[in-house]
């Protein structure tokens, strides 16, 4: 059974798909997708990108800057979730409050079905399921080993005191042809109280990516392994005292 917390640490979950297109990208596609999902995602937002072209000339290089549309974002009214659509791209983001895995999975598969119907992609180049967690510590002074099982290690010649740290590892999961990017450390911006970030991204790409018809099975397996990685990162003290696990 998944753990339930009074203070859940998920600040964002995202499932991203990169496709091989079977037809040239047409910017009418986001509009057609929006028509199908606007009852749930009524807000529209455009993300732009700057393209810089360098043209060599006599004695100098001319630079031309063009603005373009990178992707469209369709948001819920309260902006707790959004769908991002671009050339050969679909991403489904869930912000706080995170509902539950079955609810998020259903949202992912619904949006994927809409994208497939409209854009008709040929195959997947990459699929990723990512969870970004923030753990705010209730006390200013504590021993890392009392709360975390993933710890930074330094040689004896260096003081074992950390102002900040970041651990990054990539772990293969051959049973689902995936890899887990495991990132743990302090936030990039210093907080008033001690806090830690745990970023877990399970992905498959290239020939290891599942077929479009096998996506549901793959993301279920990916979520199971992300959940186990999350559970194992913390001691029981963190689960119970910091995140306030609900026990029956």
Image (cartoon, rainbow, N blue to C red):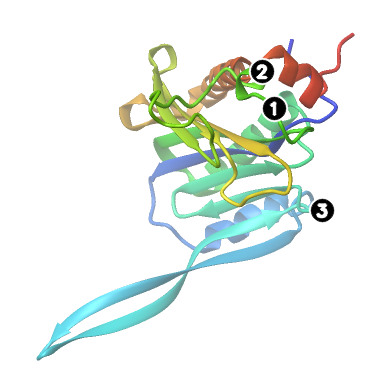
Secondary structure of the residue carrying tag 2 is helix
**Distance (Cα) linking label 3 and label 1:** 37 Å
Mark before the other along the chain sequence, 3 or 1:
3
Please tell me whether residue 11 is drawn above or below residue 146 in the rendered image.
Answer: below
Secondary structure of the residue carrying tag 3 is loop
Q: Position of residue 33 (x, y in %)?
A: 62, 53
Drawn side of residue 3 relative to residue 14, left or right: right
Disc 1: which residue: 142
Return the mark for residue 184. Answer: none
Q: Do labels 1 and 2 touch, CB within 8 Å?
A: yes
Secondary structure of the residue carrying tag 1 is loop
Image quadrant containing the N terminus? top right
**Distance (Cα) linking label 2 and label 3:** 38 Å
Q: At 55% from the left edge and 24% from the top edge, which residue is drawn?
A: 219
Please tell me whether residue 62 is drawn above or below residue 190 in the rendered image.
Answer: below
Q: Position of residue 234 (x, y in %)?
A: 64, 19
Q: Quadrant of residue 217?
A: top right
Disc 2: which residue: 146
Q: Quadrant of residue 2?
A: top right
Q: At 61% from the left edge and 37% from the top edge, which residue is drawn?
A: 197
Disc 3: which residue: 78
Q: At 62% from the left edge and 57% from the top edge, which residue is drawn?
A: 73
In the foreground, 108 or 228: 228
**Distance (Cα) linking label 1 and label 2:** 8 Å
Mark before the other along the chain sequence, 2 or 3:
3
Drawn side of residue 108 relative to residue 161, left or right: right
Outermost residue, right direction? 248
């Amino acid at each position: 059974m998944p753990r339930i917390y009074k203070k859940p640490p998920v600040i964002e979950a995202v499932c991203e798909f990169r496709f091989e297109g079977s037809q040239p990208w047409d910017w009418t596609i986001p509009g057609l997708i929006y028509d199908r999902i606007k009852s749930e995602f009524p807000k529209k937002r455009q993300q732009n990108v700057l393209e810089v072209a360098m043209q060599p000339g006599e004695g100098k290089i001319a630079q031309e800057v063009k603005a373009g549309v990178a992707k469209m974002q369709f948001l819920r009214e309260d902006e707790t979730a959004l769908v991002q659509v671009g050339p050969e791209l679909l991403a489904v983001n869930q912000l706080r409050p995170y509902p539950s895995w079955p609810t998020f999975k259903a949202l992912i598969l619904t949006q994927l079905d809409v994208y497939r119907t409209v854009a008709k992609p040929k195959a997947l180049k990459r699929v990723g399921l990512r969870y970004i967690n923030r753990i705010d510590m209730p006390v200013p002074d504590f021993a890392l080993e009392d709360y975390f099982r993933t710890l930074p290690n330094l040689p004896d010649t260096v003081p074992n005191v950390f102002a900040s740290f970041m651990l990054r590892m990539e772990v293969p999961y051959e049973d689902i042809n995936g890899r887990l990017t495991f990132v743990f450390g302090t936030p990039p911006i210093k907080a008033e109280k001690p806090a830690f970030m745990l970023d877990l991204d399970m992905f498959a790409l290239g020939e290891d990516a599942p077929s479009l018809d096998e996506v549901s099975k793959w993301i279920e397996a990916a979520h199971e392994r992300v959940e186990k990685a999350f559970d194992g990162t913390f001691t029981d003290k963190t689960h119970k005292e910091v995140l306030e696990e609900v026990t029956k």
